[in-house]
Amino acid sequence: MSRLPRIKHVRAFVVKNDGTGGGADYHDQGDGHWIDDHIATPMAKYPEYRQSRRSFGINVLGTLVVEIEAENGVVGFAVTTGGEPAAYIVEKHLARFLEGRDPSEVEKIWDQMYFSTQYYGRKGLVVNAISGVDLALWDLLGRLRQEPVFAMLGGAVRDELTFYATGARPDKAKELGFIGGKMPLHHGPAEDEEGLKKNLAELEAMRNACGDDFWLMFDCWMALDLNYATRLAHEAHKLGLKWIEEALSPDDYWGYQALKNNAPKGMLVTTGEHEATRWGFRMLLEMECCDIIQPDVGWCGGVTELQKISALADSRGVLMIPHGSSVYSYHFVITRHNSPFAEFLMMAPGADEVVPMFHPQLIGEPVPVNGRLKVPDTPGFGVELNRDIALHRPYAR
Ligand SMILES: C[C@H](O)[C@H](O)[C@@H](O)[C@@H](O)C(=O)O
Ligand SMILES: [Mg+2]
């Protein structure tokens, strides 16, 4: 039994979006932002939902902030996507498995959070809520033990992180020192051959701007069908596309298996940011759906679950490159050999400058310089909650 002080309070907050940026719900941006500019999605078959992902509700949840306070007053926290419904699950359901407990019991607490909600959870919002609690618990543990999370995960295996950038301007990402640029795909099957040609023209323009060796990738955000994805992969291969990401529905394991089999030699197939838990990723791995899995640590079950997911991938020689999730992924990636690089999401509206991903919610949020970052060895995840933001606790107990 550890000598750590017990958990006294678990609190769940939401953040009113005051137009300063989406924070953890990073899709919640204003007009003119690259991240909401005619990006292909499964909803693009409906013309009224084609221009803006906010039009169909990509930003409907908002940020969830979880705070866990120990008896000695030390507070750990984390942010993820989930908003009020996730806050309800944290306060009304999950908190009972933490309050009064030893904070070092991360495995038992995770197991009770998952299996007590299995009848209505397993993926999506519920596992986002579990992830938020788990991340806050690891932050609290780090603060109590005065250790950074990466030290508790086995320590760094390299001196610094190396990043590719996600955004509409890979040419700017190259200037800023990133190792590659992942472009949002703008046109889906509903826009037919004309849309496919536009996608390839955009890729060609970026290939010409970035030269032959700079990594270029397409992020397809679940928007395509197998035939379109296969054709796009083969045409984009001629322009040196490094990987095609999340081309199909996360539920279409069979489609990903076929896409990986049909893809041109040398083209990587990646997915996973909307998958959850060791069981979901076991399916992706055992069905050989992809070359790289991309769990989001704020959505897949948190650090406690990502350790298991990462080990499954490592045992099969598959890379685990987390979906961009700021410090929560950085502290994990630096500790794993099968995570040789990381994603940085360009949250500046023009995707042309480096700004903190979860701005303005995290004080001290580190950002890559020249595409590199040494993870600060401050306790927990090394950031503080910006208490000047409009925090609201809708289900206070
Ligand atoms: C750029 C993509 O459309 C998403 O907005 C992005 O968040 C995600 O898919 C990613 O891999 O970063
Ligand atoms: Mg993606």
Image: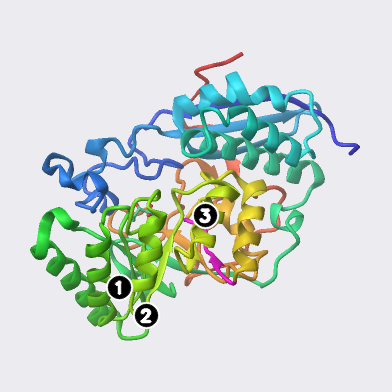
Camera-side mark, 3 or 2:
3
Identify the disc placed on residue 283: 3
Front one among 28 and 274: 274
What type is the residue that disc 2 sits on? Answer: Phe
At x 47% / y 72%, what residue is drawn? 370
At x 67% / y 64%, what residue is drawn? 335
Quarter, ligand 2: bottom left
What is the spatial separation of the Cα atoms under label 3 and label 2, in whole angstroms? 32 Å
Identify the disc placed on residue 153: none
Left or right, residue 286 beside residue 359 = right
- Cβ–Cβ under 8 Å for marks 3 and 2: no
- Mark 1 vs 2, N-terminal side: 1
What stretch of residues is rendered in magenta? 317-323
- Mark 1 vs 3, N-terminal side: 1
Left or right, residue 352 beside residue 295 = left
Residue identifier under label 1? 171
Where does residue 376 sit, x and y in percent of width and height? Answer: 65, 59
Residue identifier under label 2? 214
What type is the residue that disc 3 sits on? Answer: Met
- Mark 3 vs 2, N-terminal side: 2
Q: Is residue 87 visible?
A: yes
Q: Secondary structure at mark 2?
A: loop
